[in-house]
Image (cartoon, rainbow, N blue to C red):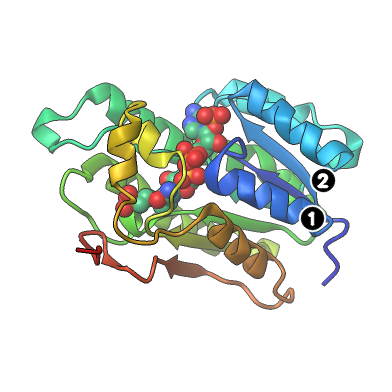
């Protein structure tokens, strides 16, 4: 399949999995709509990728901003045919009785409602393109629950449910819908979860080899570049050292 003329929207392209995916797909010839809140990161991506990228700065929690951002797309980046719903984070790691409701709001509003707002805004474009592909970045946390993961796990279980629901509802439109569900990937994820505590974040990835954002970008590329009759519907990927959310083989 020729990807030279694909127009791919990636949310959360300012770091981690989203940024690695933007770089890989631009190298494959796709035009990229890179989204995130941090304008300086988006400017850096634009400097690296030039005319292959169009950047959109908005917070996925703000539905009107989401709609306005996509309404502003220039002709060269429309219609969008591929959406990678990647923006998201964990906020906090606490037993439910000690959880901070502001963290709960952030996770539900970003990981679930934000994903819905972006999908809603781009579905007309995906349908119009006649070759729409929607990839949701879920998590192993959407397949099982781990201690103190409560609301983050719930938000990713919601992504898992929405992935299945979108596939059913969009079947008649011929849109491919699938999810990639990673285990532990070393990104800014833990830094965000632990509110900037870098030392604590680093401990999450110590003593074993975690996945890298580029590993997930490769899998995303694999899913997108399958022939049109093949849909990667639901894929789980973990580091070899990880057996489950609670079992990771670490060096003694
Ligand atoms: P990063 O923290 O490196 O990246 C998160 C991205 O999401 C950033 O680009 C950030 O951009 C964006 N984002 C966060 N909040 C918002 C918001 N309110 N509005 C718009 N964009 C937002 O983490 P990862 O790359 O690891 O995470 C990407 C996805 O992968 C997430 O959905 C995460 O749940 C999932 N995942 C991660 C795993 C891991 O172990 N790292 C494992 C399984 C799944 P900005 O701050 O500029 O807005
Ligand atoms: C990120 C992986 O195990 O930290 O979704 O929840 S985990």
In this figure, which residue is indicated by the disc labeled 2? 79
Answer with the quarter of the image where residue 46 lies. top right
Query: What SS does tag 2 mark?
Result: loop
Position of 239 relative to 207 (above/below): below
Q: Is residue 186 left or right of residue 121?
A: left
Task: Residue at 32% x, 61% y: name it.
Answer: 143
Position of 53 relative to 225 (above/below): above
In this figure, which residue is indicated by the disc labeled 1? 27
User: Residue 66: image x %, image y %?
Assistant: 62, 28
Name the one closer to the observer, 176 or 235: 235
Name the one closer to the observer, 193 or 169: 193
Task: Residue at 52% x, 64% y: name it.
Answer: 168
Query: What SS does tag 1 mark?
Result: helix
Q: Nearer the viewer, mark 1 or mark 2?
A: 1
| Nearer-N-terminus badge (1/2) | 1
Distance of label 1 from label 2 (alpha carbons): 20 Å
């Amino acid at each position: 399949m020729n990807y030279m003329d694909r127009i791919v929207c990636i949310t959360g392209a300012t770091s981690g999995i989203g940024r690695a995916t933007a770089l890989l797909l631009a190298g494959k010839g796709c035009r990229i709509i890179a989204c995130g809140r941090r304008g300086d990161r988006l400017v850096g991506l634009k400097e690296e990728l030039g005319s292959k990228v169009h950047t959109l700065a908005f917070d996925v929690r703000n539905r009107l901003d989401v709609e306005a951002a996509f309404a502003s797309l220039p002709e060269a980046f429309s219609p969008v045919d591929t959406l990678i719903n990647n923006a998201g984070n964990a906020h906090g790691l606490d037993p439910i009785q000690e959880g901070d409701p502001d963290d709960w709001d952030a996770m539900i509003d970003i990981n679930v409602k934000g994903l819905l707002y972006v999908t809603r805004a781009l579905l007309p474009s995906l349908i119009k393109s006649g070759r729409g592909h929607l990839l949701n970045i879920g998590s192993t946390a959407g397949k099982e629950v781990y201690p103190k993961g409560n609301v983050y796990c719930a938000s990713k279980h919601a992504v898992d449910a929405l992935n299945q629901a979108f596939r059913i509802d969009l079947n008649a439109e011929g849109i491919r819908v699938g999810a990639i569900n990673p285990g532990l990937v070393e990104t800014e994820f833990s830094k965000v979860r632990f509110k900037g505590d870098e030392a604590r974040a680093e401990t999450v990835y110590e003593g074993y080899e975690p996945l890298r954002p580029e590993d997930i970008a490769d899998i995303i590329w694999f899913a997108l570049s399958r022939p049109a009759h093949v849909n990667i519907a639901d894929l789980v990927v973990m580091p070899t050292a990880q057996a489950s959310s609670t079992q990771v083989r670490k060096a003694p």
